Image: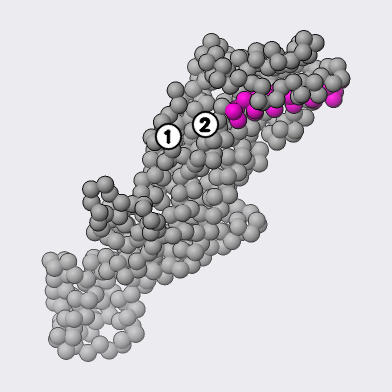
Amino acid sequence: MKINRLINQPFVHSDVANSFSDRAFVQAMLDFELTVLEVREKNQLIPKNIFQQSWQALALELFDIDAIGKQTYLGGNAAIPFVTQAKSLLPANIKPFFHQTLTSQDVIDTALMMMLKPSFRHIHQDLIEVLKACEVLIQTHRATPMAGRTLMQQALPITFGTKVSQWAASLITIISKVAQLEQSGFYLQWGGPVGVSNEENEHHNLPQQVAESLGLSAPLLPWHTNRQPIYAIASTLDACAGALENIVEDIALMSQSELGEVAEPSIEGMGGSSSMPHKRNPVLCALIKTATLRMHGHMSVISNSTAQPFERALGQWHASWVPLTEGTALMAGAVSYLKTLLQGLQVYPERMAANLDLNSDAYLIKGLEKHFEADKDKIYPLINQASQQAHNQHQGFTTTFLALLSEQSIGLSNHDELKTVLSPLTYCGAAQRQCQTILQAIEDITSGIGFYKQ
């Protein structure tokens, strides 16, 4: 049974999901089998022209993919009916050489690796675009003050640029992991029935030759029940989910009506409600969040099926297929959505400043007391009055305090010094330095110099 498109389609990347189609899976299995034949023939382990005849006889269009699907349950995997059907298409003298020295797990695992690798390239490219969008936001808002929040409450000032820098820092780590996987983390599987491989194959280094031909890495040993390659792929996807989830939770909270500090891009037809026309829902955030939650569930399956007994597992091997493929399609979709979200994110510095000033007395009072030390008898009551009035009437402390100074006709000597005391940027610590650090790291990555090391 296929998942209803109306339920699943919004959360996955359609192109990546289509690359995991039944047709693509059969093609990947076929490409692996034919490559094995080609390499074995080149090394004179089978008669000449076996590969050419097999290639001519086994066009994808000749396979009955529906029949393979219906028969998969008989052996628990698609490789068994695939091999049976392939042999039925071959001349009698060729049949004995097809699937020679292979087992069904070799075919399934290698086909999955072949299908997954291009999808990670897609994710990698989109993550770079996301990082570039972060770069623009950091450059624009490195000095845009906003409230730093801890335990869901206002704390001390930060800048929006530093918040985006934190987002980018986690993405840089993920990009490094994805790049490493793309380069060397997708392995050939070829160990035969019990994973000890074939002596002739090993003598001629055939696994290395097949891996190179397919664009895969050659493992140290066949990894039938050593599922670390699978765990590495899934854990990278799950780490990506965590980084994306952190970003969209911040954005969704900041876009609440009561805060209004950011908003999703204005896209025609997106974000509406079926019953409340005035609403502008953070739908991109919702799509990404849903994908990340589902990826966490997929990671749980992978984690619980990593330990596998003997030379072929009962169920644990089979359980990993959907989490791997669907998880990849989900994360590809989430990263694509995040690219759209950050490239068009609407930022409202005025709302950030106004929200920050609602509790600015928490960090301004000490600085003001020091600044007005000479007039403390007059100023201290005004500071207290401004603080109470600001909280009781939900007004900005700075605005209230300056108004009270004006009412009392207290001269504002050392205006520039007072301006510095009242500026949230005075209390933002190393925010500017953090922004510059991440901007340099992004430049290094996008220019191809290397990865930022955390």
Q: Which mark is residue 324?
A: 2
Q: Is residue 429 magenta?
A: no
Q: Secondary structure at mark 2?
A: helix
Q: Position of residue 206 (x, y in %)?
A: 78, 25
Q: Is residue 24 magenta?
A: yes
Image color mode = one colour
Q: Quadrant of the N terminus?
A: top left
- The residues colored magenta run 23-44
| Up-down relation of residue 15 to residue 279 (above or below) | above
Which quarter of the picture shows residue 399? bottom left
Q: Which residue position is annotated with label 1?
A: 5
Residue 420 location (% of width, % of height) = 34, 78
Residue 395 located left or right of residue 416? left
**Amino acid type at mark 1:** Arg
Q: Is residue 112 left or right of residue 416?
A: right
Quadrant housing residue 313: top right
Residue 216 on image: x %, y %: 68, 34
